[in-house]
Image (cartoon, coloured by chain):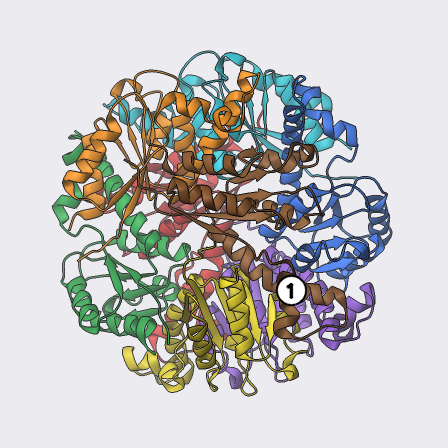
Chain colours: A red, B cyan, C blue, D brown, E orange, F purple, G yellow, H green
């Protein structure tokens, strides 16, 4: 009976594996009315976007700062538009930006799904506590979305 | 003269009778521009969704906890999307979840319609006070929606 | 260059003259992308809607109370959906409901246009202060909407 | 067991009878931890405050407008500070400002108590529906406050 | 090093056992800077407060309705003032009001502690999911408060 | 993979150069799903709209006041609808309205892009600090939007 | 009868004349319960605070940026704490920061009082429209505060 | 002239060095009206608080989950009470909780000060962009607070 309209699902975090593609494939296969939103996942484009558009900086700190501003226009807007936020932690790097996005989403009252291997459980315990579900594989996220959005 | 667009109406509460179907039939017959939103009403699917997707739990408390998280992704999102929330109390079970949803909706400023038999009047007096209307039959809810949405 | 999408304009207040029709005619003639929203303007239907749907009351106070609840589902939802609220005061009746709606809209940060004859200026000075414009004729409201929505 | 701190109670509406004094007397006698907030009740001071401070106006509309602005600094600030808003309608005058304040308070989620004679019941039915209680006498308002704030 | 000021803790739910007194005793013994807030726990005073103050009603529904309004002035104000909300479910009665208060608090972003025997675990799973902690005994609530407020 | 829907971009500030047209051209060429929103840029129409519609004023202050009210209906509504706000400062005039709009947008949490020549850097340092990016040319704004909205 | 507690009044804008001192003197003389809040008015301390604390910058833009960040911690916090915001425009400089603060305050729903000479009326018409009062002299601001806060 | 009242400053992040003590010493020496708020910094007490109070868990995930809930009561409440949030990243550990808290604070509109060594600059660029200032040493944070709170 339910008609839910389109859900916006923001996929935050790791940009070095194919987890977004696996979720996209699963969502498409399930025919879910979902718009998948994401940060720019081209690492060097993301790092350099500020100076690429607005001119170079001598200091690395300001080089990063300009890029981070442009990325924030995208990410904060998309998190605000999102109905659900998925945050993925991979096995490498600091990934503080992923945790920042999760905190940002949580304070806005967005339902959060965390996605990470067991080895991160202790370090992510506060974030997992703020999440509605903790998944290990992208396909589990697809199942959660299928249930939340389309289960009769 | 009025064009109101589509209204989202969330149907919270009892999952053991056909009240949602009766509202859906009435809304369809009246041709109202309404999207009816609902929790998952398949009782065992709802209870087990957490462990079905993310793996079993030894403790019943955590079994329930995982399922409740997945259900909350759906119900909190739909309540936030709703223009009006209807909450139904049947004759059996504790139905604390229905009352929780009603409180959640009330604090978000959603207009609330309660639907229950007279025998629950005293126990539901605070909830009914927070509601804009208390109906006894699903068809009365349809009439209220017809008036609110489509009455010239 | 501007594309504004559709604006929702709620027309609160007096139900005993043709001011809504005059605004509707002007908006249609100007081809504005406006959805006009309104309370139920059939006086007796509005007064009796509570008891008509949910059963009669011995006390007039509760008769009114039940009707007011059903009307509030409509009016509060539409004010929340509105981009602009117009509030009209005619020459008769207390019209406290119109002033209540105006205060409600003002606290939600909705731009307010008041519409009333000069004779009410002193009594409506606080409300006019909260409004962005005070018009005397419905056609002036149309001109304001035309400027706000469609002026290049 | 309960320690509630001080409650701010804003007394909106009629300025031509002694209802505020009666509430103040009752609150004092009951020893309630209440700060009573109110608009300026000196009618001519209130009407003229804008021009008295910032200079005269040739047009009555702007004379009123300037005064209404200064009064709004007071009333909107106090309504925002209030925990509870009481709104009184007397037997004379339009009193649209009282209804505006009530709508403003309601949209901010402030619990509302209306206070008026029975003869206004029909005209105030929407406002009374938005209120948590409708009293006839100031002493009843004191009793409600006593219960809400100090009843063990 | 930390100075947290006073915390407001609202104790919602069951009024037929001494759990509030046990929390009060524990808080006092621990010397916590806590103001404990509560609904009126005198059952008949709570049921009848509306008609006691504002006059009797022929219909039980409106008798309850008037009382529920006065109680809501208290409970909604205190929940809004609260930093933490504890909700207790006992072994008897419907206790829908407790669940409504919990939903209301959750939607306002208040940290929630649930307190109930294991037998209610399944029926309260959604509410427990929304809570930050589920305790079995009032003394555990005191320990949680001690940690949250005063642990160095 | 991303589908972002349409973004509303409000273009605040200077009305004496072709910067809006240059952004519109760039956005069109890039095929971005952007609705460009703007104030009325016809200077005299904007100045006189209040008296043109609602009648002349003897005092210039009130002439301006009436016009500013009508313009505010447009600008505040569009800023509220905006996903991103661009604010342009040209080389002439006080342009306090542009700075006011920027502060308004910032407090609503809208991502801000400032656009101005270097000569204004010191005077605009607080505003630039609140912005996510400071551009010198309209084409840079287009590049920022392209990245934020459409970069894979 | 009224006890309003202390009001926080933020004094934004011009730092090159003695208007804040004149308001402080007037408020003290009137014995008003007002806490006057202000930005740092030592011009060079304000400009250089970022580099003074966190180290120098080669680029003037980032020198300013660092300082603006530290000032924003102060000004945004104080505007949020304020009950009323006064914004003063003097005869010199761009003063875009003052207009930005006014827009920021307006969007937060703070009552605004503007203070400036007549020569700025046209350039400040939108800001004056958003204000509750426009004063010419600091002493008029004191009178407005006296009325709003302490008039019986 | 300014009286700002007490500021609440929440100190998030690293618990393995003496940075909080250094800020506390500096604040005390400067005589600032600051209440310093902090999470529990006793690592094992923090890890085990859930099971210590509410009973042991067989699964480490739920052991952590229970503890994280109790800690969240404290941290989310204190972040909501805070006027300013300082977030510190040390040289060890994942510290995702610190980044989560920073995102949470940012979305609530709290001014953020980040504190970390240069080696983290690139990994923290998004978080630093959301901050009003990035400091290297606790004493710089004290200077920023001194300026923001007490500079005449």
**Splitting the image into 4 quarters, where does residue F95 fall?**
bottom right
Note whether D95 is above or below E51 in the view shown.
below
Horizontal arrangement in the rendering, residue G55 relative to residue D149 (left or right): left
Residue in the foreground of this view, choosing between A121 and F120? F120
Disc 1 packing (10 Å; few <14; some 14–19; many ≥20): many
The quarter of the picture where residue G77 lies is: bottom left
Q: State the residue in front, H49 or F20.
A: H49
Residue H73 lies in what quarter of the image? top left
Q: Secondary structure at mark 1?
A: helix
Residue A42 drawn above or below residue C54: below
Image coords of residue C65 (percent x, y) = 63, 28
Q: Is residue B144 above or below residue D61?
A: above
Query: Can you see residue A80?
Result: yes
Q: Chain of mark 1?
A: D
**Left or right relative to E87: residue B18:** right
Place of residue G16 in the rendered image (x, y in percent of width and height, measured from the top left): 47, 86
Using the image, determine if residue F149 lies above or below residue D82. below
Pinpoint residue H93: horizontal percent, then vertical percent: 19, 55
In front of the other: A1 or H30: H30
Q: Residue placed at 28% from the left, 77% from the top?
A: G54
Dividing the image into 4 quarters, which one contains the N terminus of chain D?
A: top left
Q: Tell how many labels.
A: 1
**Image quarter in which the C terminus of chain D is found:** top left
Residue F150 visible in image = no
Residue in view at x 48 percent, y 69 percent? F131
Could you tell whether B30 is left or right of A142 in the image? right
Check disc 1 and report the residue beneath it.
Answer: D67
Can you give x and y, in whole percent of width and height, for residue D35 in the image?
43, 50
């Amino acid at each position: 009976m339910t008609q839910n309209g389109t859900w916006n699902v923001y996929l935050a975090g790791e940009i070095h594996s194919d987890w977004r593609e696996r979720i996209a494939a699963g969502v498409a296969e399930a025919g879910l009315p979902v718009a998948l939103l994401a940060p720019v996942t081209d690492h060097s484009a993301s790092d350099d976007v500020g100076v690429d558009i607005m001119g170079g900086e001598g200091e690395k700190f300001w080089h990063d700062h300009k890029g981070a501003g442009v990325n924030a226009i995208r990410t904060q807007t998309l998190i605000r538009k999102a109905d659900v936020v998925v945050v993925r932690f991979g096995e490498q790097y600091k990934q503080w930006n992923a945790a920042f996005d999760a905190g940002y989403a949580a304070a806005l009252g967005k339902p959060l799904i965390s996605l990470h291997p067991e080895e991160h459980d202790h370090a992510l315990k506060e974030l997992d506590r703020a999440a509605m579900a903790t998944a290990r594989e992208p396909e589990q996220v697809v199942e959660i979305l299928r249930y939340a959005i389309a289960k009769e």
